[in-house]
Image (cartoon, rainbow, N blue to C red):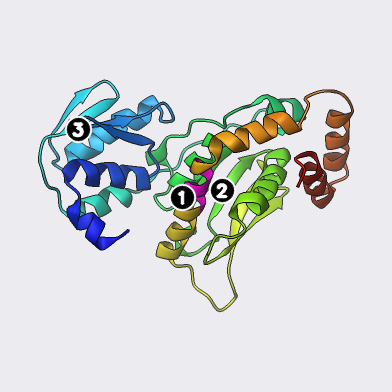
């Protein structure tokens, strides 16, 4: 973040920026910070609890609030942005793996931002906003590769298409690849060189960069999928054959053809 811009921010702008970086969808209007429809009810209650815990006085009206001080320190922003997530169960149903729900689903799912790892929350929430169903994300905790669990194989293949179309020019510190065959069907995983160590700041920079592009093009990405794929007929059967034969590269290439890439 630009330091000069940061110094010019009042308390409302700083809190809004910190919450956005932590994965919440926010708008600022008439001195109110609005937690928009992309958030869950749990997100709203957890934000209230977090701000109270940090000693930040607020006035709430439903899903929006005012910050009742004019300044908050940068250290408070960092505490919000680095608020740790927690483990939570992931439930997979049969429809997660099927073609028809993949085509029909416009958005992904609503995952509680403050349950997700701090470094990955914005990326996970933005994937779902763009209609790529992401179940959970883990920053690896310095020991393992950061990853995002996706809902079925079709979501993984679709992310590969979207990555090449929208994210391939990003200046990322790690390679973010899709792997198939895990319990959820597919996952996005960061890869590094053998001699490298995981750097949480670099992981965060990558995740935020990808998230911001996905948010910018979310409507376009959702419409691209809606226009390209049909839920029944030969298209459905062809997609199923790719999966049954584990021809994942062929599935990705086929999807690219359908979107005219």
The residue beneath circle 2 is 148
Query: Tag on residue 31?
Result: 3
Give the Cα distance between marks 3 and 1.
28 Å
Q: Which stretch is magenta?
A: 210-215
Q: Earlier in the sequence, mark 2 or mark 3?
A: 3
Residue farthest toward the top in the current orientation of the protein = 62
Magenta stretch mostly in which secondary structure? helix
- Please say if the residues under marks 2 and 3 sit with CB atoms less than 8 Å apart: no
Residue 9 vertical position relative to residue 105 in the rendered view, above or below:
below
The quadrant in which residue 97 appears is top right
At x 87%, y 24%, the residue is 233
211 inside magenta stretch: yes
- Please say if the residues under marks 2 and 1 sit with CB atoms less than 8 Å apart: yes
- Please provide percent x and percent y for residue 240: 84, 35
The residue beneath circle 1 is 120
Q: Is residue 182 visible?
A: no
149 inside magenta stretch: no
Give the Cα distance between marks 2 and 3.
35 Å
- Please provide percent x and percent y for residue 160: 68, 50
Q: Is residue 208 left or right of residue 153?
A: left
| Callout in the foreground (2, 3) | 3
At x 18%, y 31%, the residue is 66
Give the Cα distance between marks 2 and 1.
8 Å
């Amino acid at each position: 973040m630009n330091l000069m811009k940061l110094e010019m921010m009042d308390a409302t702008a700083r809190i809004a920026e910190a919450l956005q970086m932590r994965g919440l969808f926010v708008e600022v209007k008439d001195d109110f910070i609005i937690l928009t429809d992309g958030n869950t009810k749990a997100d709203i209650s957890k934000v209230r609890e977090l701000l109270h815990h940090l000693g930040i006085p607020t006035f709430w009206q439903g899903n929006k609030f005012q910050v009742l001080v004019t300044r908050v320190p940068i250290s408070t922003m960092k505490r919000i942005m680095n608020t740790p997530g927690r483990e939570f169960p992931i439930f997979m149903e049969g429809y997660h793996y099927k073609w028809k729900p993949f085509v029909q689903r416009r958005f992904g799912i609503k995952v509680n931002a403050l349950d997700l790892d701090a470094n990955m929350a914005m990326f996970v929430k933005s994937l779902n906003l763009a209609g790529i169903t992401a179940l959970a994300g883990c920053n690896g905790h310095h020991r393992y590769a950061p990853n995002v669990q996706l809902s079925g194989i079709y979501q993984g293949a679709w992310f590969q298409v979207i990555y090449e179309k929208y994210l391939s020019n990003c200046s990322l510190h790690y390679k973010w690849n899709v792997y198939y065959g895990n319990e959820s069907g597919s996952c996005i995983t960061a890869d590094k060189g053998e001699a490298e160590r995981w750097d949480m700041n670099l992981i965060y920079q990558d995740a935020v960069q990808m998230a911001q592009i996905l948010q910018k093009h979310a409507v376009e990405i959702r419409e691209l999928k809606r226009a390209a794929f049909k839920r029944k007929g030969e298209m459905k059967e062809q997609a199923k054959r790719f999966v049954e034969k584990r021809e994942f590269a062929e599935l990705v290439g086929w999807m690219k053809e359908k979107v005219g890439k």
